[in-house]
Image (cartoon, coloured by chain):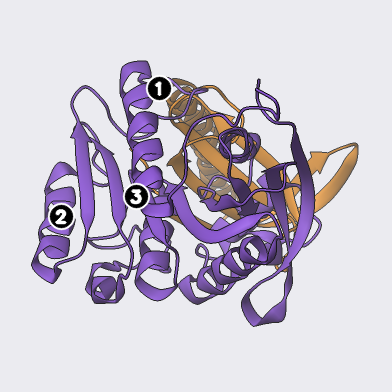
Amino acid sequence: MIEPLLAEMATIWGHGGDPVPAYVARPLGAGPYPGMVVIHHLPGWDEANWEIVRRFAAHGYAAICPNLHHRDAPGAAPDDAAAAARAHGGVPDERFLGDCAGALRYLRALPSCSGRVATIGYCSGGRQSFLGACELDPDAAVVCYGAFIAGPPPDGLSTMVPVLDRAGGISCPVLGLFGADDTHPSPVQVAEIDAELTRLGKEHEFRIYDNAGHGFFAVDRPSYRPEVAVDGWRRIWAFLRRSLQATGEPVPAQGD
Amino acid sequence: VCTYATERLAVSGSGKTAGEWSSLTSASVYVDHPYTTPLEHTLNIDLFAESVLPARQIALELSLESAEALIAAMSRAVEGARRTANDAQLATADLTVGDG
């Protein structure tokens, strides 16, 4: 049995004090539950990310995913907002940091939250999870194939500058999961990030999977790699168990 | 891969969606993960109706093979129209010379 969940839309106070819509899912018990900020990818604040939020809730986390594209198109559908964000050159880092800080504050203020909160991001969200670890105060950060942490930014998206030079500010453990067949980031770039974190003495665990490219966790895409994804989730639960004193297992219902 | 590389350009013309026509002013073109198509990558085209975003009017997610076929068809159509226009200009020039 898994404890009942509540999933709903909420409003957080993000960068500049702006109201930002967020998808929230959390166990209905008294807790204390650790928290997880899920950072969506550039293609949008979409169902795949909301599903990840519910997965964390099912595993005993208070989880949230703010709409990082909200200001680019207030009130628009998530796909239109993503198109507008892209046309604007991507999500500015300072705005992301303000919104992520708002999400961390929201979770820590929940009566059922233990106060220990991590971030996880995929793709562009992986870069942002890394950036949040550099500049904010999460208790752990998971980076899933985060592109452009190192290396030149992509054409037309000038906001996606490399952030590896900010790694000195990291104050929490970092888990990085990557594919050997990926080119954004390439294994060479992953090695560069790994080496820099080692040089700086930052606690981190990096894993590069063979026979996997970009997006191996995405169950609705041809890039999905079941064996890699299953191992990746196990590593995520184990990492969070260590970093947040979380169980990482489905929460039994009362009386079980 | 996840490139994020995005071309932005100004366009002029019109687009129709939900039964309404709008004047198109700009476009984004990129190969990246689609929002809804179950493929790894698609050629994505966002057509915007106003300089003030987010007035996206039309969105396309095309398989790369479809995109190449469409690009080739569009090129043939535009080149054909240009050839026709050039022929007409030459015909007009011949007529002018003949009149002289």
Q: Are marks 2 and 3 in contact (CB under 8 Å)?
A: no
Give the color of chain A as drawn.
Answer: purple
Q: Secondary structure at mark 3?
A: loop
Looking at the image, tell me whether mark 2 or mark 1 is earlier in sequence order. Answer: 2
From the image, tell me which residue sits under label 1.
A224
Q: Chain of mark 2?
A: A
Q: CA distance from mark 1 to mark 3?
A: 16 Å
Chain colored orange: B
Same chain for marks 1 and 3? yes
User: Closest to the observer: A93 or B18?
Assistant: A93
Name above or below for residue B3 compared with residue A3: below
Q: Which residue is mark 3?
A: A146
Three-letter amino acid code at disc 2? Asp
A225 displayed left or right of A53:
left
- Asked whether, in this view, residue A114 is left or right of residue A156, the answer is right
Instruction: Give the residue type at disc 1.
Output: Tyr
Q: Residue furthest right?
A: B19
The chain under label 1 reads A
Residue A38 in the image: x percent, y percent? 54, 49
What residue does disc 2 label?
A194
As measured in the structure, the alpha-carbon distance from the residue carrying label 2 to the one carrying label 3 is 13 Å
Few, some or many residues within 10 Å of mark 2 (<14, 14–19, 20+): some
Badge 1 or badge 3: first in the primary sequence: 3
**Residue A52 image offset from top left, x and y in percent:** 57, 36
Q: Nearer the viewer, residue B50 or B75?
A: B50
Q: As shown in the figure, which amino acid type bears the numbered disc 3?
A: Gly
Q: Label 3 lies in what chain?
A: A
Q: Nearer the viewer, mark 2 or mark 3?
A: 2
